[in-house]
Amino acid sequence: MAVRSKRERVAGERSLLAGVGISAIGIGMYVPFSLVFFHQVTGLSFALVGAVLTVTGLAGLGFMPLAGSAVDRFGAHRLNLVLYAVRALGFALYPLADSLPAFAAVALVTALADRSFSVVQQSLIGEVARGAARDRLQASVRALQNAGMGAGGLLVSGVLAVWGPAGFAYTAYGNSLAFALAGLLVARVRPLGDASDRSTPSAPSAGRPAAGYRMVLRDRPFLALTGANFLTALGYAALSVLFPLYISTWLHGPASLTGAAFTVNTVLCAGIGVLVAGRVRRSGARRTRSAALGSLLFAAAFVAQIVLGTLRPGPGVTMVALLAVVVVYTLGELVHSPAGGALSVSAAPEAVRGRYLATYSLSYSLASALAPSLFTGLIALDGRLPWAVLAVAAAVAALALVRLEPYLPAEAVHAEPPAVTAAPGAAAAGPAARPEPAAV
């Protein structure tokens, strides 16, 4: 046990997590009010702000593959600092961008950095940690992001209560300061110095990868992993898109129920996320099966929504039942996210990790882009139909994750290599052993 604890230590981990938390506070200060926020700080109409944000968001989505290539060429740590600097500069300039061209230019550059950041941050976790430490960092990062965004939302509410609309400008400068401080903290993180993470050929000299996206497209197990994550990612999009729509149009519940659902999810993610992930990690479960369990918890929550939508009890019972569903849903998120994230990072060859994770991240982005039209179209037919589609998708994703086990690298499936947990006499044979696909 002592050896494992030492192995899990990450140089500069506290600085990395502090940077994540501080930047999340900045994000939480503007995301809940994005249209109003940018309208107030630029003076442009809501229509223009919305159009610019849509176009720049799509441009940022298209930029993600280039971000993956940049990670492979320059390293995630260096690129992470660049993106923090770009976001800090962008928010410092927003209050000065009072014309459409100026706002579009600042929004475009900031959107490119925002959309690419998840790819770079996932790659950074791969650079600074290996083994079970990746799962632990995934859980800690997600918990801090939820806590920071919640704190940021409360902070901006206080700022607006004191200064009124003028507080939005102060919020923009506060965001800039948060990103700058986060960058200074993450600068203290030190990536691992060796490349022994995978049994694939090591990266070529001068940081030039041996292959580009053609290598990713030829990796069928990883593409299947990405497809399975897309099915689960539709469930992640349900909380922000489908829950409010379902509550108001099918359950005919008050708007406060939506706020309560978000609050329960945020508090649980921030409060017990690390504990749940740690319990799953210490159980020795394979990452594929932990992620599959998370998907099945999603499916259970979606089936419960179908039952709730069929019975449609009184307001009091509906509120209790809905919050219980949110708890199950959140547990699914807490189990799936660390395992799924670490699985994708560890399944990517180190030399082209950025490209692999850019491809994987597109599953989340595509799900987020499709969710509004998909959910609104299905709920117009029957309020229970989108939940049925999501339940089937989550169940298929869970099955796919388990079926993929024999085709993924052993060090991706297992948080700790078999050799670490094997008996001393069997240590020499451990690395070559592959788990039986049918074993549970």
Image (cartoon, rainbow, N blue to C red):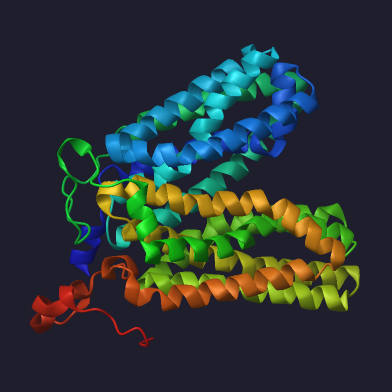
Residue lying at 71% horizontally and 76% vertically, measured from the top left = 303
Residue 313's x, y, as percent?
89, 75
* Front-most of residues 160 and 430: 430
Q: In what quadrant of the picture does the N terminus appear?
A: bottom left
Q: Is residue 288 above or below residue 70?
A: below
Residue 404 seen anywhere in this rendered image of the structure: yes
Residue 159's x, y, as percent?
69, 27
| Left or right position of 411 against 423 | right
* Front-most of residues 437 and 8: 437
Residue lying at 69% horizontally and 39% vertically, measured from the top left = 32
Residue 285 seen anywhere in this rendered image of the structure: no
| Left or right position of 8 against 148 | left
* Front-most of residues 415 and 359: 359
| Left or right position of 421 against 396 | left
Residue lying at 79% horizontally and 56% vertically, measured from the top left = 376
Residue 310's x, y, as percent?
85, 77
Quadrant housing residue 420: bottom left
Q: In what quadrant of the picture does the C terminus appear?
A: bottom left
Q: Is residue 68 above or below residue 381?
A: above
